[in-house]
């Protein structure tokens, strides 16, 4: 069993930055691929970014390319989402997810474990 706990959400202004953290515990973390998803009010949850177990490969959704960066620190058993140039459209609950294989995925149902989410609100 894997437990994921997100932190770092909050209120930011347009053009500002936030860094989300996802601390993992309970299983061997270094072999799992990780992802970030988000869900805005009234919308379905959507893919944001993912990385391989080594962190050497990453993939971002088009809506956040050039602004968000996913990274991981296996020694700290933590994955991060650095969010720059925030826009009001980025307002959502952000979820960290893990899957029991090393390869990335943009598909929500292919992830096995989820955190409880952290709220990000961007004011205009």
Image (cartoon, helix red, strand yellow):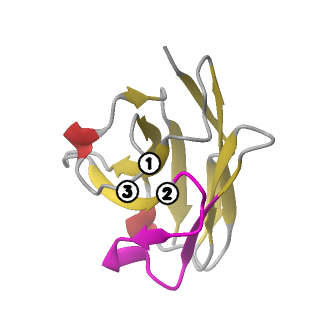
Q: Which residue is mark 2?
A: 52
View extreme (bottom): residue: 66
The reply to whether dot 2 and dot 3 touch (C-beta < 8 Å) is yes
Residue at the (61%, 80%) spot, across then down: 15
Residue farthest to the right, as pictured: 75
Q: Nearer the viewer, residue 74 or 114?
A: 74
Mark 2 residue crowding within 10 angstroms, few (<14) / some (14–19) / many (20+): many
Q: Which residue is mark 1?
A: 102
Q: Tell me where residue 91 appears, x and y as whole percent.
A: 44, 57
| Disc number placed over residue 80 in the picture, else none | none
Q: Is residue 66 above or below residue 16?
A: below
How far apart in space, not on screen, are marks 2 and 1 (Cα)? 6 Å
Circle 2/circle 1 CB separation < 8 Å: yes
Quick one: label 2 or label 1, which is nearer the N terminus?
2
Q: In this orientation, which residue lies closer to the viewer: 18 or 28?
A: 28
Please tell me the numbered disc located at residue 104: 3
């Amino acid at each position: 069993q894997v437990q994921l706990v997100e932190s770092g959400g909050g209120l930011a202004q347009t053009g500002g930055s936030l860094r989300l953290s996802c601390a993992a515990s309970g299983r061997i973390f270094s072999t799992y691929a990780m992802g970030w998803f988000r869900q805005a009010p009234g919308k379905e949850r959507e893919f944001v970014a993912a990385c391989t177990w080594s962190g050497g490969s990453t993939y971002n959704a088009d809506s956040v390319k050039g602004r968000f960066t996913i990274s991981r620190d296996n020694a700290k058993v933590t994955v991060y989402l650095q969010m720059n140039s925030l826009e009001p459209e980025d307002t959502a609950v952000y979820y960290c997810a893990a899957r029991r294989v090393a390869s990335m995925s943009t598909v929500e149902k292919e992830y096995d474990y989820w955190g409880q989410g952290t709220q990000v609100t961007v004011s205009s």
